[in-house]
Structures are given as structure tokens and as C-alpha cells.
Image (cartoon, rainbow, N blue to C red):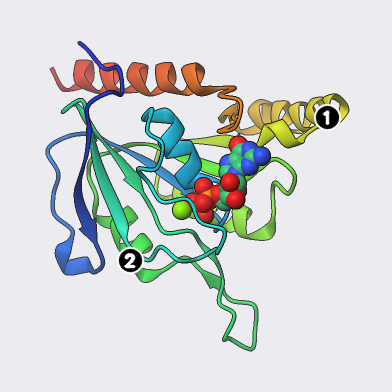
Amino acid sequence: MKIDFENVRLERTVYTLEQLKTQMLPEIVFMGRSNVGKSSLINKLLNKKNFAKVSQKPGKTRSINFFVVDEKFYLVDLPGFGYASTSKEDSFRFSQLIQDYFRLSKKIILVFHLMDSRVPFTQLDTIARDYVTNLGLDYCILFTKVDKLNQSEKSKLKNQADKLVKSFGFDYFFFSAKTGEGKREVQSFIINRIIESREKKD
Ligand SMILES: Nc1nc2c(ncn2[C@@H]2O[C@H](COP(=O)(O)OP(=O)(O)O)[C@@H](O)[C@H]2O)c(=O)[nH]1
Ligand SMILES: [Mg+2]
């Protein structure tokens, strides 16, 4: 099976529950707080310069974008989550659309949770992780912007992540859209999951 991440198109942009459809292909989902580096990661994985939009302003994307990769799977780009700034209390904003999507899709085979390497494991991240894992979805962590860490910060983060692996069994990745670190590893991980999901089906 040929997956080289070269043949990519944006198939659908979804703003409402009504627009969500049952998909035929397996879905690989990317979620994270606003500004975590999700668009940059997607561009890097897909070998594109400005496919997913990269912005300095957080929280702009409100839609779910479905990219078809090599006609084999969907890469699903979720809106960034964050605190609702208008609310008096700090309420978690994991939009209704995101929740509907997670509940309704039967094709999700893996969720990548992106965390900023410099500010990982925020309370929001914990809530998002629990939400996804409670639905029984396959879940892994991807630390973004690792080029911003020095060696000692990096090994400290590795230690924290290794503890997570020990207690929960989550896979994790270090990624930099700037240097390309982790790109091959993440691509192979995705390819293996797609192959596994096809074997299960047959
Ligand atoms: N140094 C560095 N900066 C990054 C990296 N990835 C993203 N950024 C920057 O972080 C900001 C937010 O990135 P973006 O991809 O738009 O994040 P999104 O809101 O999660 O889609 C932009 O200024 C990017 O240039 C990375 O790997 N390294
Ligand atoms: Mg973005």
C-alpha cells in the first residue's frame, strides 16, 4: 500500500453537526490548544508550505477540516480549544462541534493530542485527554515546537513523558515543524495504524 503523504486535498470543511457525514476512510485526528502549532505540523507532515493556515492569532479556526491523504485516510484538523474569554468563570471550551464529532464518528482510529513542549500538561490538556480516552479512542501525545527546548529541558520533558507511558501506555512524539524532527516517525506511526485498521477489517 502506497502512502507517501504527497497526494492531498481538502475534501470538506464542516461548521455544523448537520454537515458531519459518515466517512468511508479511517480518520486520524489532530487536536490541541489554540496556537499549539497544529497547522504547522499538518503542513510539515503533508510536505506543503501553506496548506493548513498558519496564523499568529490564536483561535481563528472554527471549522473541522477533512483532508484526504493518498486516497487512503482522512487527516482531521479540529478547531483549537481554549478558555472562553467572555465567560466569568474559566469554562472549558471544547466546542459542541468537537464533542459531536468525537461522539458520532465511527472511523476515528487515532487521536494525536498536541501539546506545546514549553507548556505541556495544562489543566485544559488533562480535560481534553480524559474526554477522548473516556470515549475509548486510541490516543497519543505529540509535543510541538521542541526546537525551542535546550537539551536539559528536553530530557526533563522526556522523563515526564516516560512516566505517562508507564502509567497509561500512551505513545508520545517530539516534533518540530521548524527542523522536521519527528516527521518521519509520526508519518510511519500513522501508516502503521492505517495498515493495522485495514487488517482488522479484512
Ligand atoms: N519554533 C517553532 N515555532 C513553531 C512551530 N510550530 C509552530 N510554530 C509557531 O507557532 C505559532 C502558531 O502556529 P500554528 O501552526 O498556526 O498553530 P495552530 O494555531 O495550532 O494551528 C506560529 O507563529 C508558528 O510559526 C515549531 O515547530 N517551532
Ligand atoms: Mg491553525
Say which residue appears at 38% left-offset and 24% top-offset: 190
Residue 36 showing in the rendered view: no
Q: Amino acid at mark 1?
A: Asn
Labels 2 and 1 touching (C-beta < 8 A): no
Classed neighbour count for the residue bearing mark 2: other residues with Cα under 10 Å, few (<14), some (14–19), many (≥20): many
Q: Report the side of 169 relative to 164 (left or right).
A: left
From the Cβ of disc 2, is ligand 2 less than 8 Å away?
A: no
- N-terminal of the two: label 2 or label 1? 2
Residue 115: give x, y in percent of width and height: 61, 44
Please, is residue 180 above or below residue 126 in the view?
A: above
Residue 12 showing in the rendered view: yes
Say which residue appears at 55% left-offset and 64% top-offset: 57
Residue 140: give x, y in percent of width and height: 51, 34
- How far, Cα to Cα, is label 2 from label 1? 37 Å
Quadrant (top left/top right/bottom left/bottom right) for the N terminus:
top left
The residue where tag 1 is placed is 150
Q: Secondary structure at mark 2?
A: helix
Q: Amino acid at mark 2?
A: Leu
Please, is residue 94 above or below residue 107 in the view?
A: below
The residue where tag 2 is placed is 97
Classed neighbour count for the residue bearing mark 1: other residues with Cα under 10 Å, few (<14), some (14–19), many (≥20): few
Residue 85: give x, y in percent of width and height: 59, 80
Q: Secondary structure at mark 1?
A: loop
Tally the numbered discs: 2
